[in-house]
Image (cartoon, rainbow, N blue to C red):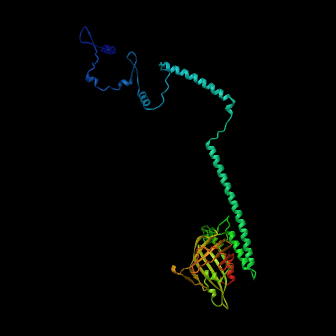
Amino acid sequence: TTMMFNAIALASCLHHVVLTDAFSPAASRIVVPISTPSETALFGSKRRGRLANNVSLNDEGRVSKVLTNKQKQKLGNSKTKRSAPSKKSKSDNVDVAISPLLAEWATSSTDTEDVASTISSSSMSSPAATVFVPFTGEDDELEISTTSNKNRKKTEKEAKRSAREEANAMQSAQIDAILGSIEDLLETSNYDVSQLMSYIKTLVDVGNSSINQVLTPNLKSLVSARPSSKKRATKSFSGDDEEDSWKQPSFRLAWVGSDNAICHIGTSLHKVPLARLQEIYLLLGYNRWELLEVIRILGPFPNVRNTLRGDIKLEKKRTNDNREGVRLTIAYNSMVDGTGKEILAGKEDNFKYVKLDIWFASEKAIVCTVPAEDDEGDEYEVNANPFANGNGASILLFVAEENLDEQLEKLRAA
């Protein structure tokens, strides 16, 4: 029996099956060839399995290699990954065929590289390659021109600023000299009015010079003066508010041409019997006009201080001779009498409107005139010549007062 099975296994390897009749005495053997299945329509439509993918055959048709699971996994991963092809193993003896055109191109490229390397080596060895030549393009020229323009404009601004500062210094020196002459003249008992008028006219001309016509800006800065928010919020090292160190622009009426001009801006209470006008002070700031009248009553009576307050409106004007001026309109809406009682105007119809023409304004002095009237009593829009009248009946001259509180205490009107 064992010999029979061995014979069958050997016959299967030779593509034949040997069947042995064990019961026949002659032990005759029958060889039956195995036929391959014919390709029919039914067999061709069957789906082919994947078993052939795991087996590789040699030239003789025999199985030369069977792939293991790890090899199949590596083969599958190499197909999915987009990586460079791996190097061939030394055991792979595969002849690679190269086309003649590719071989010719490789030979020509090698020659070209040799020539290029020769040229580059010769150019690097030349002395001209070591010399650096700076390049100046349009961008560099534009940057240089822009820088030069900025420097030129900066120089022009500095020159204008220095010229302006120099002119302001000269103008301030002239104003101080004129005001000093006016004060010296007013201290004399019998001064010349015409000379005083010439000083005032010179003061106005200096303020309206062609270099710096700053009447309107100066007047606006005086009228709108107020302590800054930073000063109000902070305190000094001594514990006092910074607002206390700020001084409100204050002036004293140094000279007036007539009593009508005083009545034009004041209360006219100095005309009351036994009353004499002592001083008039002016406070500016917060866009308001505050006028203080100190009146002396003859007899054993204290001095009386009347205070007029009102809003201010400014309007720029020019005379026929191109003189700069400002029409100032005061709307009095409050009055504090000598007893300290405040009287409000209430309705706008009860406001008292007063107009003045300002011809000079600075922190040191203010020159203004009462607008002239025509025959019907109406005010002219602009006085053609505010100094035409030689006696200066419409002129009011205010000078700066440094210590207003101290002066009011001396007058017992604080």
- Relative to the observer, which residue lies in front, 244 or 330? 330
Which residue appears at 71% of the width and 72% of the height?
202
Residue 75 vs residue 33: left or right? right
Q: Position of residue 238 (x, y in %)?
A: 67, 71
Which residue appears at 27% of the width and 23% of the height?
43
- Relative to the observer, which residue lies in front, 83 or 215? 215
Q: Residue furthest top?
A: 26
Q: Quadrant of the C terminus?
A: bottom right
- Asked if one can make out residue 229 in the rendered structure from this viewpoint, the answer is yes
- Asked if one can make out residue 323 in the rendered structure from this viewpoint, the answer is no
Q: Quadrant of the N terminus?
A: top left
- Relative to the observer, which residue lies in front, 175 or 303? 175
Q: Position of residue 339 (x, y in %)?
A: 60, 86
Q: Residue furthest left?
A: 24
User: Is 299 located above or below residue 267 in the figure?
Assistant: below
Q: Position of residue 399 (x, y in %)?
A: 68, 75
User: Is 116 located above or below residue 179 in the figure?
Assistant: above
Residue 70 vs residue 157: left or right? left
